[in-house]
Amino acid sequence: MGKKGFILCVCQGTCPSFSKMDIFGVLSDVRREKLFDYVVLHPQLCVGDGEEFMKVLLSGDETEKLYIAACDPQMQCKMYRDAFEAVGFDKTHHFALDIRNKTTEEAVAAIKQLVELNP
Ligand code: SF4
């Protein structure tokens, strides 16, 4: 069975939208809950090297489902589309969550809910 991957993207860590949460606290909690096969922190997925990262990550064909907690879900779909198409990743297996302006607890709860709704 393919793996479930999780990426947390945080606008370089300097955006006020992410100031209420402890970024590493979110990742640690998500790991502890064993919601995914792997978790990754990326500072800026929507620029050139972020797209390159996505291609490298997905090119091995091992990730079946990719959960991304970042900004607006519709924006995410547009921003990652080229990378998904380049490696043949099924975009319906990308589950996007907006976690801006959430506390650590709120972010973790939202991530859990995302996985429950999209197992
Ligand atoms: S993908 Fe979204 S959260 Fe990540 S850097 Fe770009 S705008 Fe910010």
Image (cartoon, grey):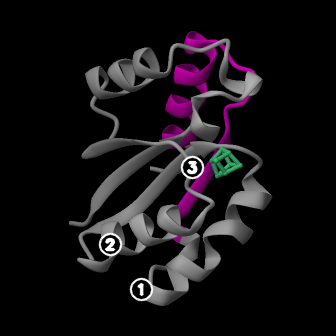
Seen from the viewer's position, the closer of residues 118 and 79 is 79
Asked if residue 28 lies left or right of residue 11, the reply is: left
**Nearest-to-viewer mark from 2 and 1:** 2
**Which residue bears the numbered disc 1?**
87
With respect to residue 106, does 56 lie above or below? below
**Which residue bears the numbered disc 2?**
56
> At x 69% / y 59%, what residue is drawn?
76
Task: Note whether ligand 1 is within 8 Å of mark 3.
Answer: yes
| Residue 36's disc number | none
The answer to whether mark 2 and mark 1 are in CB contact below 8 A is no
Q: Residues within 10 Å of mark 3 (few under 14, many from 20)?
A: some
> At x 67% / y 16%, what residue is drawn?
19
Over which residues does the magenta segment extend? Answer: 93-116
Asked if residue 56 lies left or right of residue 93, the reply is: left
**Nearest-to-viewer mark from 3 and 1:** 3
Disc nearer the start of the sequence (3/2): 3
Disc nearer the start of the sequence (3/1): 3
- State the image coordinates of residue 55 (x, y, percent, origin top left): 40, 75
| Residue 44's disc number | 3
Q: Amino acid at mark 1?
A: Val
CA–CA distance between discs 3 and 2?
15 Å
- State the image coordinates of residue 62 (x, y, percent, origin top left): 24, 70
- State the image coordinates of residue 53 (x, y, percent, origin top left): 40, 64
Q: Could you say whether the residue bearing mark 3 is in a helix, strand or loop?
A: loop
Count of numbered circles in the view: 3
